[in-house]
Image (cartoon, coloured by chain):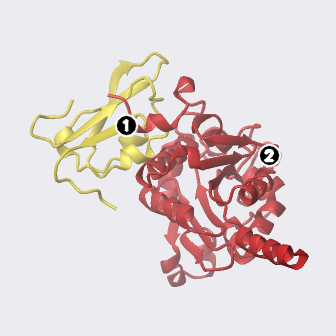
């Protein structure tokens, strides 16, 4: 018996190139379930991605129109696509190094404009594909290839940053919380403005081995034990909460969407000319 | 694979599986077991050994990074959320 969801994938290159136990495969799996349950035609989806392990989810595996762009510029390309084709679902799946590191400015300005993109940031806490260099989301004092005695920096709280920049839907889940993640992905696709889901994912090969969690399952158990729901975060105090991963819906608000505003302004301009 | 009285059937695509054991470890009722069978890429694939314990919660199907687990539910079983 074949999996019904394989019709959404480019099956000639399966099984995936991901390491055994990698969270990117889980994100691909849940995304296929979401597309199937929402009955979205893959022809109405335009996937945009950058460089990195998680950028393999849309390109080459998910079979829709795909833009595989330069490092960090996924949202810049996606903005152009959305302005020209506002009726399509423009979905960006990329990693933390791509969106938070090199393309960080594109991310916050897309959130500020509230353009109708759906962004799934797969956060594996490291530059996994290139050999485990420190990324802007690597936790403090974790040894990496470029910081062998421990990371001296503080990590980016990227979901909070996007919420503060003005995105209309922001949530953070992990690859352990599969049902919540599925619901969040559905909400993000249905939401009209800029919607952002940070997906904390396991990387057994580059990150896990440096923190003593060599298998994907070890990191999944870590997500299970060390994450707290945002609705219960108030019960914890100061130092306790810094070591925990806060998951849940961080923001949901209604703001004018960028492409609609742009069209209104253009109509005003046309009237003024006439 | 599944018992005849069970309304839930689990299929595992042996050629997609990479033997990461996430389904074995995360299944609460311990349905899966590591088999002695090696697939064509050299991974030990899991088998749904105790099908009668399966509650149809769908965690293994959703969390499998290779889309290798398929749960076929017929009848009244509701999805746990």
Q: Which mark is residue A119?
A: none
User: Is disc 2 surrounded by few (<14), some (14 to 19) or many (20+) residues within 10 Å?
Assistant: few
The foreground one among A22 and A181 is A181
User: Is disc 1 surrounded by few (<14), some (14 to 19) or many (20+) residues within 10 Å?
Assistant: many
Whole-percent x, y for residue A157 in the image: 70, 67
Determine which residue is flagged by label 1.
Answer: B69
Determine which residue is flagged by label 2.
Answer: A148
- Which chain letter goes with mark 1? B
**Residue at disc 2, secondary structure:** loop
**Residue at disc 1, secondary structure:** strand
- Is A217 above or below relative to A191? above
The foreground one among A143 and A95 is A95
Mark 2 or mark 1: which is in front?
1
- Is A95 above or below relative to A256? above
Q: In the orientation shown, which residue stands out farthest toward the top?
A: B40
Whole-percent x, y for residue B74 in the image: 20, 45
Which chain is tinted red? Answer: A
- Which chain letter goes with mark 2? A
- Is A104 above or below relative to A7? below
Whole-percent x, y for residue A145 in the image: 79, 42
Which chain is tinted yellow? Answer: B
In this picture, residue A177 sits left or right of residue A83 = left
User: Residue visible at 50% across and 38% down?
Assistant: A8
Labels 2 and 1 within one chain: no
Among the 4 quarters of the image, the one containing residue A64: top right
User: Residue visible at 50% across and 70% down?
Assistant: A228
């Amino acid at each position: 018996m074949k999996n019904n969801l394989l019709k959404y994938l480019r099956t000639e290159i399966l099984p995936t190139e991901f390491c055994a136990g990698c969270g990117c495969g889980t994100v691909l799996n849940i995304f296929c379930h979401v597309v199937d349950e929402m009955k979205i035609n893959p022809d109405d989806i335009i996937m945009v991605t950058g460089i990195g392990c998680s950028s393999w989810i849309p390109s080459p595996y998910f079979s829709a129109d795909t833009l595989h762009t330069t490092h960090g510029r996924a949202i810049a390309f996606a903005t152009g696509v959305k302005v020209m084709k506002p009726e399509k679902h423009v979905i960006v799946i990329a990693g933390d190094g791509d969106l938070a590191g090199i393309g960080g400015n594109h991310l916050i300005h897309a959130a500020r404009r509230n353009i109708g993109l759906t962004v799934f940031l797969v956060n594996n806490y490291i530059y996994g594909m290139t050999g485990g260099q420190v990324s802007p989301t690597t936790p403090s004092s974790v040894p990496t290839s470029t910081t062998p005695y421990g990371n001296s920096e503080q990590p980016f709280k990227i979901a909070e940053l996007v919420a503060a920049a003005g995105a209309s839907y922001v949530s953070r889940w992990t690859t352990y919380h599969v049902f919540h993640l599925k619901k969040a992905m559905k909400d993000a696709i249905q939401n009209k403005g800029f919607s952002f889901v940070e997906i904390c994912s396991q990387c057994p090969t580059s990150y896990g081995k440096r923190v003593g969690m060599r298998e994907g399952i070890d990191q999944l158990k870590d997500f299970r034990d060390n994450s707290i729901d945002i609705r219960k975060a108030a019960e914890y105090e100061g130092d306790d909460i810094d070591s925990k991963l806060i998951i849940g819906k961080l923001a949901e608000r209604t703001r004018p969407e960028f492409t609609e505003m742009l069209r209104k302004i253009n109509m005003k301009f046309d009237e003024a000319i006439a | 694979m599944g018992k005849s009285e069970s309304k839930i059937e689990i299929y595992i695509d042996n050629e997609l599986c990479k033997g990461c054991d996430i389904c074995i470890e995360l299944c609460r009722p311990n349905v899966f077991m590591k088999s002695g069978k090696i697939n064509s890429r050299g991974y030990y694939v899991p088998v749904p050994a105790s099908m009668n314990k399966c509650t149809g919660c769908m965690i293994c199907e959703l969390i499998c990074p290779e889309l290798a687990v398929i749960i076929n539910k017929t009848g009244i079983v509701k999805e746990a959320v």
